[in-house]
Amino acid sequence: MKTRIFYILLFISIIRLHAQSTNKGENSLGTWYAVTTSSKVSDKFSISGSLTNWNYKIVDNQHLLLAIIGLNYKVNNAVSFGIGYGYGSIDTSFEETGDPYLIENRTIEQISVKYKVYKFSLSHRFKLEQRFIEYETQYKFKNRIRYRFKSSFPINKRLSITFYDEIHYHLINGLDFHQNRAYAGLGVKINKNMNFQFGYARHSYKTKSFNRLSAQLNLKFDFRKAKI
């Protein structure tokens, strides 16, 4: 019971912290849509994919469209490693840079650790990204490090509550804050291979923050040969 109260208070505190931020982003409520896939090809290896779309408004004024594919290796039930590649187009007009449009190619390395405490499913993800960014008049290379803490708690067999917070730093003469993403939402298990997440996300940059409704469809596939 104490553990449950602790996490509820943690969720409320973080949401309030972001809501009270002095950052002033666009007033309109935006959206964050995503589809993710995880395909097992063996007991140890899987292929992951995702397509993400951010909008400054509900259905238009696109902020980001990003596709990622990755290869993952499961060390054991708790630890996994992954590498990946991403390609995206980004409109940063409302961010602090003021650059209207850019194209990004990125390579990715990550490690994930997951475990359970009581009924809570907890995970830590550390990610390194090498970002090759094409602006309208120049090219830039940036290294970025990300850390995400995620917690899920089942309400019943089909419903769950999920929270996570992920902070991003560029590695420029040390750690240079880039952005933070906080999320809280409801998960619905459709079947063992499909679930849907709906919630609220807060994207905070150095000078601006954005409120977004989030909708995400997660799909799982198993291409391992059936054991006879």
Image (spheres, helix red, strand yellow):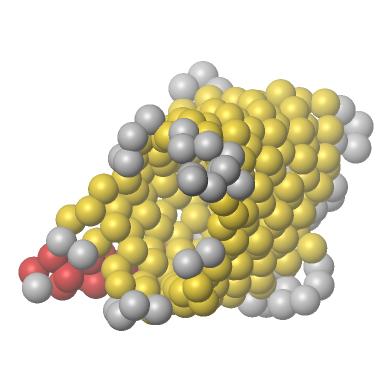
Q: Residue furthest right?
A: 137
x 66%, y 71%: residue: 31
Q: x, y percentage for residue 83?
A: 58, 30
x 73%, y 74%: residue: 57
**Vertical side of 205 occupied by 144: above or below:** above
**Vertical side of 64 occupied by 20: above or below:** below
Q: Residue furthest left?
A: 2
| Count of marks overlaid on the render | 0
Depth check, front residue: 6 or 38: 38
x 73%, y 49%: residue: 66
Q: Can residue 112 be seen by looking at this rendering?
A: yes
Q: x, y percentage for residue 207?
A: 57, 53
Q: x, y percentage for residue 215?
A: 60, 72
Q: Quadrant of residue 217?
A: bottom right
**Vertical side of 39 occupied by 163: above or below:** below
x 69%, y 34%: residue: 85
**Vertical side of 207 occupied by 105: above or below:** above
Q: Is residue 159 left or right of residue 57?
A: left
Q: Can residue 211 be seen by looking at this rendering?
A: no
Q: Quadrant of the N terminus?
A: bottom left
Depth check, front residue: 203 or 31: 31
Q: Residue furthest front?
A: 228
Depth check, front residue: 36 or 41: 41
Q: x, y percentage for residue 184?
A: 42, 69
